[in-house]
Amino acid sequence: MMPLYAVICKDKEGALPVRQENRPAHLDYINETGIVFMAGPLLEDGQMAGSLVILDAPDLAAAKAWAAADPYAKAGLFESVSITEWKKVIG
């Protein structure tokens, strides 16, 4: 198994419409790229407010490239993006 990388993204304030508009393209991208181990939105008060994506990528550069090409990132949704190596222990 290649290293895993956690991509943790926080949305800009008030950007829920941007997220909703780009969600189909984001989900298509996840399915097309084939390196997403698991993913889901971060929530604030029950509303989507960010993303957590675990990538099964060959290296940090590939994880960064994946994150930069995400339709959400291209739409300017995120206030911040953090990418770090992650080790699965449970689950």
Image: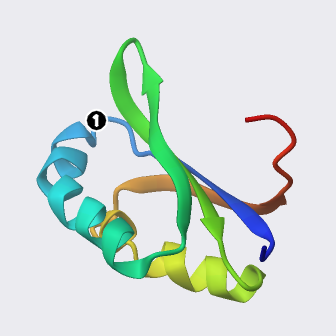
Residue at 35%, 31% in the rendered image:
48
> Which residue corresponds to the image point at 21% horizontal and 54% vertical from the top-left?
23
Does residue 10 appear anywhere in the picture? no
Q: Position of residue 43 (x, y in %)?
A: 44, 25
Image quadrant for the C terminus? Answer: top right
From the viewer's perspective, tell me whether residue 79 is left or right of residue 4.
left
Secondary structure of residue under mark 1: loop
* Drawn side of residue 82 relative to residue 45, left or right: right
Residue nearest the observer in this picture, 54 or 18: 54
Q: Is residue 45 left or right of residue 56?
A: left
Which amino acid type is marked by label 1? Gly
Which residue is at 34% across, 56% downward?
A: 77
Would you place residue 17 above or below residue 80 in this image? above
**Residue under pointer 1:** 14
Q: Is residue 54 above or below residue 76?
A: above
User: How busy is the neighbourhood of tag 1: few (under 14 within 10 Å), some, or many (20 plus)?
Assistant: few
The colour scheme is rainbow
Q: Position of residue 64 (x, y in %)?
A: 63, 79
Quadrant assignment, res 72: bottom left
Vertical comparison of 46 with 30: above or below = above
